[in-house]
Image (cartoon, coloured by chain):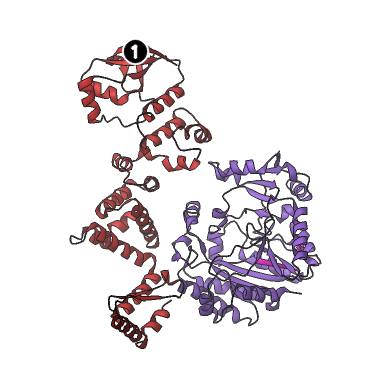
Amino acid sequence: MMNKVLYTIAIPDIDLDDDLYQYSSPVVPEPLRLSIQRFGLLNPIILQRKARSAYRIVCGFKRLAALVSLKAETAQAFVVEESCSQLDLFTLAIQDNQSVRELDPVEVATILAKLQSTFGIKKEDIVTNYLPLLGFGKNARVLTLYSGLHTLSVEWQDALKKDMVSLDFAQDMLKRPPEERQHIKTLVHNLRLGKNRQREFIKLLADVARLEDLSLSQLIASRPVQMIQLAEKLTPSQKAERLKEWLWEKRYPQYTAIKAQYDAIVRAAHLPPNIHIHAPAFFENNEYLASFTFVSKDDFEKSITALSEILNRGLVKKMSELA
Amino acid sequence: MSTFASKKSFVPKKIYVEESVASTPLSKRIIRHAPHSQVDVIADAQVLLEKAASSLNKGSWQNNLLLAKQRGPFLRRCPGTPKYLCCLYYNLDVAAGCDLGCTYCILQGYLNNPLITIHCNTEEMYHELDSTLRKNSRIFYRIGTGELSDSLTFEHLTELGPELVTFFADKRNAIIELKSKNVHIDALLGLDHRGRTVVSWSLNTIEMQKSEEPLATTIDDRLYAARAVQNAGYKIGFHFDPMIDHPGWHEGYRDIVDKIFRFIKPENIVWISLGALRYPAPFEHILRENHPDSRIFLGELLPGIDKKLRYFKPIRIDLFGSMVKWIRSYSKEVFVYLCMESADVWRKAFGWAPRSSAHLKQLLDDRVKP
């Protein structure tokens, strides 16, 4: 495929706008620029000859951009002929990066999109032949999971690269209009929501918005949600908890009402701190759990007396009749 | 026989026939009844099923039909659900998959395959049934074909109903229940069933039928079919499962109860089951993805003891308690039971509860024992 002779190519002969094989961000990492400035190009780029003595970049988009920024006039390169299969060269470009680092989700998304739209590869063939190359096995769901992520705004792409948002959350964002994405991004930032909580919150918000016949933007912009986000005295995690409570009241009104009644009963019991009463999860079964710790006979007797009191005051009956 | 305006008759675009069942009477019958379907004989159904399961365009497989060999047993105990009362039913897995596409159907999660499959080695099925029923002559079996599919929806192709009715007619320790949302009943009407077949319909409110079961027949047609089957001497069952908490459900379900008793004599109703919308939590994203416009997933569905998502308990108690009250206003005798519910919900909705799953089974068996 490639003649192993190293050529010195004049940079003006290289078509810098030809992005046929490009799938990475064009931003040059500063360490790479500094390395080239100090030691020169240690790893030659790979070019493909085009008509009229011009060249197209196969591998080394960032290295070349660094050379350009350093005002270099030539670049050391291996050259492949125009007749070489473009798909083979794209595969080479993928493997060139994979040999030194892991591809980020946006790069994977770009590769999958290019395989389909630029190189005309059918989805089935991508699953069979290219997903394993990218380290995914023949899992068709990967296509769905990565599809379109490269079209997200740079901010979302950066969040993906930094592993601050999950792939399915990013997919969810793709389906939403830009205004909604912006509202969600601000909310995620204000509440410092990690990947797991992002999913939990977006589901709750989307459900509540539907129940209230609002758009997601309208719901996030609503006064109660804004008040929680802007509350100065609350930490981000307290804000998240407060918002979750508010959303649960909207999403599960009957459950939260019963839960509030239960909490009121427990508060009214004025139990000493060594006694705990646990309601069944979501009041689904009817088994309550009462437990206490003790360090002495006196302690034990006091706890039994306190439990007897809540029984005599009818609070146990009230609890068991809640749901 | 009256015709049903909303009757659905699945016509497969393509029929794949596994070589080993190509010459069975059921395969031949299905192919004969689908003269316009392209027929492909394949060596191994498993290969095709894997291909369909991993296909990126699952929708394209839904119009096809696979005639395959059932490799495992046909008869299986209903898995029920841990920690809830179960009626200890048996499923006869002749078909897997359905053409009706109801939004709430958990087959979307259980069957990871878009290809509707009919198991055509029925000779082995009857042999297995004979042998099981004979070997366990002291056990009474309530058996249904409506768990992994709809019992009647492929009847125009399979004509399996008359076969099953005839097979069970002389069985002393079993009945067959044909449970459906379709109305392919004509072939059942003149048979000597000897009370060993229960024909059942799944019902919901008109509003839920329209929004969540749009490809199934109308509720009225189901009731007309039930009346025709009643007139042919069959016992009738009704299943309100899943009941769905939606605005206007009181009026909606009440109307259907009224209709039932206008169409069917209470003494011909062998049972009415009630079950509220529920599904394993991991299936939720599949159901939501498949039916993004459905609002049923916005109900107060919370994890139950078995980790399935279910309506918050007081909502279920209200649904079931209301239904039983309306049913009782027509008949004190019709047996109403809950599918996969706790004894606590039974007591709060009905005022009593079976002592155990075995007790519930006994009560249901007693309804149909000879």
On the question of residue A139 being in view, the answer is yes
Check the image and name the residue furthest to the front: A296
SS at mark 1? strand
State the image quarter where residue A218 is shown.
Answer: bottom left
In the picture, measured across the screen, residue A248 lies left or right of residue B122, that is left
Three-letter residue code for mark 1: Leu
Q: Is residue B199 magenta?
A: yes
Are there few (<14), some (14-19), or many (20+) residues within 10 Å of tag 1?
few
Check the image and name the residue furthest to the bottom: A312
Q: Which chain is red?
A: A
Which residue range is magenta in the image?
A: B186-200
Q: Nearer the viewer, residue A199 or B82?
A: B82
In the picture, measured across the screen, residue B38 lies left or right of residue A148, that is right
Give the colour chain B carries in the figure: purple
Identity of the residue drawn at 64% across and 69% down: B238
Q: In which quadrant of the rendered image does the C terminus of chain A lie?
A: bottom left
Identity of the residue drawn at 40% across and 36% down: A109
Q: Nearer the viewer, residue A239 or B70?
A: B70
Q: Is residue B121 magenta?
A: no
Residue B209 picture location, percent across and down = 56, 63
Residue B105 picture location, percent across and down = 56, 58
- What subunit carries mark 1? A
Tag 1 residue: A6
Residue A5 picture location, percent across and down = 37, 11
State the image quarter where residue B171 is shown.
Answer: bottom right
Q: Nearer the viewer, residue A186 or B337?
A: B337
Identity of the residue drawn at 51% across and 64% down: B278
In this view, A182 is above or below A63: below
Residue B303 picture location, percent across and down = 45, 64
In this view, B190 is above or below B349: above
In the picture, measured across the screen, residue B283 lies left or right of residue B173, that is left
